[in-house]
Each structure stands twice: as structure tokens, then as C-alpha cells.
């Protein structure tokens, strides 16, 4: 058996019905400046031409490994990739996104210079193709604290945009059935004092906000069930800092659900469900810092205030709102 290179990155790409975007994703991953990759593509029961594309790339590039399974969901697909991964480092790339040619090279350089357990980069939300910027050596890298990580709403909870050491992941897996906040639950476990984070200060990951993306579809109600996972964890969590993070995340999910469903015909019922969850969360706010208690209290009372916050982070939501209004 061939020896596994010490610097091998296992790139896990879950694939489900993304035929129009898959080649762009794979070309960006395989065409980058860092050669020591294995690309584990997990076809999760696609009904379009995605599997044929994966087989084509597997046949012509020895770094590509295709795992074909029945549709079991995003978490199960990523877990299947983790089981097959051989690298000392793990990265996740969503199959409708793409990465800068220096993505893996700069993340590995960040790991080499910082020794961090998880190295992340900045991400750019985009609705279409754009030319890649030229970046010189060396990449700007610095260690960041948990407090600073919490201030990065786009990057902190996503599985993509990060290089994980295999040792920090260990036996940790994505929680099946927790979609669409499985990334958040996965990463929440690493936000503790003994895990070191570093940031490459370049927007190397392209987060493609396609029109039928989950965040731009009426998926709010499906997120509500994930608050139950967090509430169960809060009750069992003995670490005060982790408990605070779970309380904060539960609030954010409810706010997001309430916003994403605001054009639904049965919005009154959804809003009532959100209000019930916020009532359960209200006494738990005592564990939060004063600033968060005030902020979450205001957002709970004023949905329009949360809307402004979301649009500030993701201006493409304005286009989504116009589309929803036109069809409501």
C-alpha cells in the first residue's frame, strides 16, 4: 500500500443533484496550487447527472475517490467521507461552491506558521462567477481568540472554509437529522479553550448563493426542530461557556426561522412556534453576558431589527425578498 503523505489533505465533497455546478467545484479543488490532496466525493443518491460527472473525474485524476450511497442527507454524506478519509488534515467543500487556487496552499501555510488545530479563511458570498484575485506570498496569518471567532457570523459555524487537523476531529461526526444546522452543531464542539484557531486573512472560499439554496428557500420551519437538539444539550452541558454558546445559537436559529418564513401563507402559525421557543429560552438568557441579553431580548421583540441585521451580513437576501413578495 502506498504511504500516505504527511501533508495530505482529505477534501470531503458531499454531492446531491448539483450537475450544473459540480465541474466548477471540482476544477477549482483539483486545479489549485497544493498537490497533496485526496478528494472524497460522496454522491448522496443524486437523481441528475452528478454521479456520471464524478465517475469521469475519478477516471482521469487518481486523487478523486467516489463513494456512492443512497440518499441519506448531508450529515450522513459528510460522515461517510470522514470514514474514508486518510489525510492528517480534513477540509469540506460544498459541491455548488468553489475555492481560490491558493485555498489549500494558504490554509496549510497558516497551519505551519500557527500550529493551530483549525485554520479558517475569509469567505465571499457570491451569486455568480467572478475572476480570482492574485495574492502574493506569504499569506497574512494570525491566531484568533474564541471571542473574535464569535464575531465572524459567516465563517464560524460552517464546515467549509476551514482546515481541521484529524486529531481535533477525532471521533466527532455530524449529527444526522439536524440539517440545516448540522455545521453549527459540529463546530460548536470545538469552541473550547484547548482548541487553537488561526485565520488566513484572505477571501479564499466562494460561497455560492444560488436561487434554490436552502437559505433562500422556505426552509425556516425545518430549522425549528434543531432547537430541540440545542435545548437537550443545554440541559446536559456542565461547561458554562459551552452552555452560553448553545443558548446563543438557539436564539439565532429561532430568529432565522422567523425571518425565512415571513412570506409563508401560514406565517402566523410559524411565528407562534417561534414565540413558544423564545419563551422557553427567555429564562436561559441569564447565563449570557449583559450585551447578549439585551440584544437577544430586542431581536425577540422586534423581527424587523433582525431583518436589518441579516441583510447587512448577506445583501443578496434583498433579491430573495423581492422574489418572494412577487410570488406571494
Image: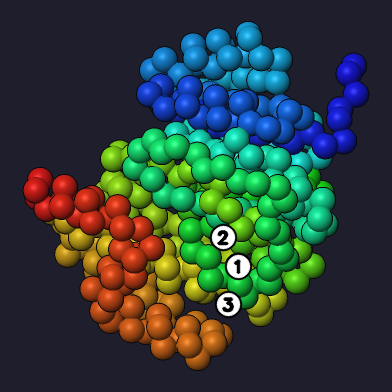
Q: Nearer the viewer, mark 3 or mark 2?
A: 2
In space, the residues marked 2 and 1 are separated at their CA atoms by 6 Å
Residue 156: which numbered mark, if any? 2
In space, the residues marked 3 and 2 are separated at their CA atoms by 16 Å
Residues 252 and 88: in front is 88
Q: Nearer the viewer, mark 1 or mark 3?
A: 1
Q: Earlier in the sequence, mark 3 or mark 2?
A: 2
Check whether the beta carbons of the residues at disc 2 and disc 1 lie within 8 A of each other.
Answer: yes
Q: Which residue is mark 3?
A: 244
Q: Is residue 227 left or right of residue 269?
A: right
* Observer able to see residue 266: yes
Q: Which residue is mark 1?
A: 149
Q: Residue furthest bottom?
A: 290
Question: Which residue is drawn at the image coordinates 15% and 52% (left, top)?
Answer: 322
Q: Is residue 15 left or right of residue 311?
A: right
What quarter of the picture does the N terminus occupy? top right
Residues 130 and 322: in front is 130
In space, the residues marked 1 and 3 are separated at their CA atoms by 15 Å
Residue 40, position in %: x, y?
A: 65, 27
Helix, strand or loop for disc 3: helix
Q: Residues within 10 Å of mark 1 (few under 14, many from 20)?
A: some
Question: Which residue is drawn at the image coordinates 68% and 52% (left, top)?
Answer: 139
Amino acid at each position: 500500500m502506498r504511504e500516505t503523505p504527511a501533508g495530505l489533505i482529505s477534501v470531503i465533497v458531499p454531492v446531491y443533484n448539483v450537475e450544473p455546478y459540480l465541474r466548477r467545484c471540482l476544477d477549482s479543488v483539483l486545479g489549485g496550487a497544493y498537490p497533496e490532496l485526496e478528494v472524497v466525493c460522496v454522491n448522496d443518491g443524486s437523481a441528475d447527472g452528478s454521479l456520471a460527472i464524478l465517475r469521469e473525474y475519478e477516471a482521469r485524476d487518481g486523487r478523486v475517490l467516489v463513494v456512492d450511497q443512497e440518499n441519506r442527507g448531508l450529515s450522513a454524506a459528510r460522515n461517510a467521507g470522514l470514514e474514508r478519509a486518510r489525510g492528517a488534515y480534513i477540509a469540506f467543500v460544498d459541491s455548488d461552491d468553489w475555492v481560490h487556487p491558493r485555498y489549500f496552499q494558504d490554509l496549510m501555510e497558516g497551519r505551519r506558521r500557527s500550529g493551530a488545530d483549525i485554520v479558517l479563511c475569509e469567505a465571499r458570498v457570491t451569486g455568480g462567477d467572478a475572476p480570482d484575485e492574485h495574492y502574493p506570498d506569504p499569506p497574512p496569518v494570525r491566531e484568533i481568540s474564541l471571542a473574535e471567532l464569535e464575531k465572524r457570523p459567516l465563517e464560524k459555524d460552517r464546515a467549509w472554509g476551514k482546515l481541521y487537523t484529524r486529531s481535533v476531529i477525532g471521533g466527532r461526526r455530524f449529527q444526522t437529522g439536524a440539517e440545516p444546522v448540522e455545521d453549527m452543531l459540529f463546530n460548536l464542539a470545538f469552541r473550547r479553550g484547548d482548541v487553537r484557531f488561526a485565520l488566513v486573512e484572505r477571501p479564499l472560499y466562494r460561497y455560492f448563493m444560488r436561487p434554490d439554496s436552502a437559505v433562500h428557500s422556505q426552509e425556516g420551519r425545518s430549522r425549528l426542530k434543531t432547537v430541540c437538539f440545542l435545548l437537550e444539550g443545554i440541559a446536559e452541558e456542565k461547561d458554562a461557556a459551552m452552555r452560553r454558546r448553545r443558548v446563543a445559537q438557539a436564539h439565532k436559529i429561532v430568529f432565522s426561522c422567523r425571518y425565512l418564513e415571513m412570506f409563508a401563507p401560514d406565517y402566523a402559525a410559524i411565528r407562534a412556534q417561534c414565540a413558544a421557543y423564545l419563551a422557553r429560552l427567555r429564562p436561559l438568557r441569564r447565563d449570557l453576558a449583559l450585551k447578549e441579553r439585551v440584544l437577544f431580548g430586542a431581536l425577540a421583540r422586534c423581527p424587523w431589527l433582525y431583518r436589518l441585521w441579516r441583510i447587512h451580513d448577506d445583501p443578496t437576501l434583498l433579491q430573495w425578498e423581492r422574489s418572494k413578495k412577487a410570488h406571494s
